[in-house]
Amino acid sequence: MKRLVALAALVAALYAVPALATPYLLHVMVLSCLYAIPAVGLNLMLGYTGLVSLGHIAFAGIGAYVAAWLMVDARLGFWSALAIAVAASGLAGALIGAICLRFRSHFFMIVTLAFGLMLYSVMNNWDDVTRGAAGFPGIPRAPGFTTLESFYRLALSGALLAFAIQWRVVRSDFGRILLALRQDERLALAKGVNAALCKTAVFALGSALAGLGGVLLVSFLRVAAPASFTLAESINAVLVVIVGGAGSLAGPALGALLFVALPEYLRVAAEWRLVAFGVLLVLITLFAPRGLAGLIAEGWRRVARRSQ
Amino acid sequence: MAAALLEQVINGAMTGSVYVLVALGMVLIYGVMHVLNFAHGVLFMLGGYLCHFFLTRLTGNYALAVLLTMAALAVVGAMLERGVFRPLQGNLRNQVIASLGLILALENLAVALWGPNALQIKVPATERLVALGELRFPLQHLLIIGVTAAVVAAMFVFLKWSKFGTALRATSQDRNAARVVGIPVERMDVASFALGTALAALGGALVGPLFLVFPQMGDAPMVKGLAGILLGGMGSVPGAVVGGLIIGIAESVSTLFLPTDYRDSVAFAIMVLILLARPRGLFGVRARGEP
């Protein structure tokens, strides 16, 4: 009960941010939300199931470009374009995931990397449909969410939806199966789990969430450019998940805030910020494999023990 | 048509040679330590930058600069092994994630130190043209192919007949058995990392004069090198050589039929298709720890 109240207070505070924040801070908050949504999808794959995908953001790109094409060329409304685009990324995730999942451990990572690069190459070069390297211009913002304040509410709602889905999945039987697959796939198989189907399903779900993030991102920026869906961005998504805490419910939110908001606040140059995050990623794998969420939980436990 | 084909084959052999250098280093490290180092490409990139630095600031001699670059990066490789990859031994997922961290850190360090713009390494061998039949190639192309061939030959001799090379192979076949017969396994890890990194540095230093030096220059060779390793069979040294060359030549020849924009995808598509048909690659060896 106490937790529920705290969560409700947090959500209310998040929705109240536009009343207090400067436009600049609000912009940063929007970007944090938009980074968190694909990260939730990757957290389900990487954190809970143990599938390290190195091409995750390419699926955000699929959603983004499908939505862009539907809205600009096919003159569809925002919401139907959003729904179709998310479904398309999920479907692409199921198809490509089914191929990638025929491989194990590092082979899986390399094949996801290769698919990520191939999808990027299509976005960058299929000029007739994607408008090539210059990007796909003229994407409208969602109706009713054209100002920065209102778009923040949309992005926040999207992020909260993603977290709600994550919570629902993790607490379900399906989520327990995913955890079992991460911990001991052979044992899970022996217990009668259809590993291939479950892994394909989580790959599709993760990709659909990435697609949701991608559609909102290009709707915010009003342009879909291949530069938003590079290998570097896929690595950033892994970084957000790992730094925040892979396999923890709040991890992607903490990771996205740390990755987007903190450096803006500290006003460091972009390249030094990424140098610092690269080093941080190495340090976290070495010393704090449960990420920021793990560190906070550990700290909280210590404080609680001392106060007893 | 024949001339165009020959031209693309030679071009492909050149880029393929670069992939071979990257793939050889990665396969050595993978074979001995069972570590997949995705940061191999940024070490390749550092090779290009350090070569530029040594050439312009320290010596005017390209060959000397290349050797200095290899030595410097061998030290970096040894340090990475001790500091990052050894503590993570046995945890493949964290090793990969740490190597992604190294990509971010080193690639952006290069941007911070040298700026985002490409640097040029001025070497006479890029300007001198050599005639092969009716075709002409920059000397640097042939230099890259020649140096790679020499390195591959030296590697085979080293691994096959030297005591040290035999110890490396023994470690890669069975770590515990190697320890039992008195091979200092930890030293083999450092050696394989240093050697592998030096080979990446050689690749970067050789390509630098041809295609400029820039922060992302190692990304494509790393992925293509990986594709070459998978194609040849993970952990097989001859496989890495053949795989790297196949990828290089296939993507060059594909430009005769497909728009050049898609040549990267050709390499990856070949890789995925071959893996689906032959999961252990062309020279399939069953790698340690693989089911």
Image (cartoon, coloured by chain):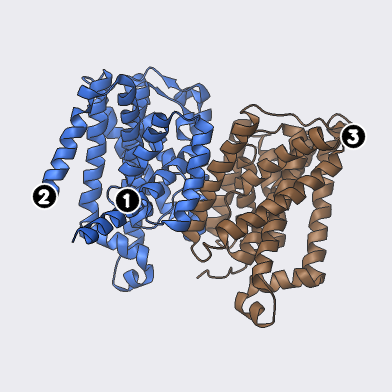
Q: Chain of mark 1?
A: A
Label 2, residues with CA under 10 Å away: few <14, some 14-19, many ≥20? few
* Residue in the image at 75% along x and 41% along y: B205
Give the camera-side residue of B43 and A308.
A308
Left or right position of B98 against A66: right
Question: Would you place residue A284 above or below residue A61 in this image?
Answer: below
Q: Which mark is residue A293?
A: 1
Type of the residue with mark 2: Lys
Q: Which chain is painted in brown?
A: B
- Respond whether the residues carrying marks 3 and 2 are from the same subunit: no
- Respond whether the residues carrying marks 2 and 1 are from the same subunit: yes
Question: Would you name the residue on which mark 3 appears?
Answer: B130
Q: CA distance from mark 3 to mark 1?
A: 61 Å
- Respond whether the residues carrying marks 3 and 1 are from the same subunit: no
Percent coordinates x, y for residue B130 in the rendering: 90, 34
Q: Which chain is painted in blue?
A: A
Q: Chain of mark 3?
A: B
Q: CA distance from mark 2 to mark 1?
A: 20 Å
Q: Which mark is residue B49?
A: none
Q: Earlier in the sequence, mark 2 or mark 1?
A: 2
Question: Would you place residue A32 above or below residue B167 in this image?
Answer: above
Q: Is residue A103 visible?
A: no
Give the camera-side residue of B64 and A128.
B64
Give the camera-side residue of B69 and A155.
B69
Question: Would you name the residue on which mark 2 appears?
Answer: A2
Question: Would you place residue B275 above or below residue A274 in this image?
Answer: below
Q: Is residue A267 visible?
A: yes
Numbered disc 1: secondary structure: helix
* Residue in the image at 79% along x and 56% along y: B152
Q: Nearer the viewer, mark 3 or mark 2?
A: 2
Label 1, residues with CA under 10 Å away: few <14, some 14-19, many ≥20? many
Check the image and name the residue furthest to the left: A1
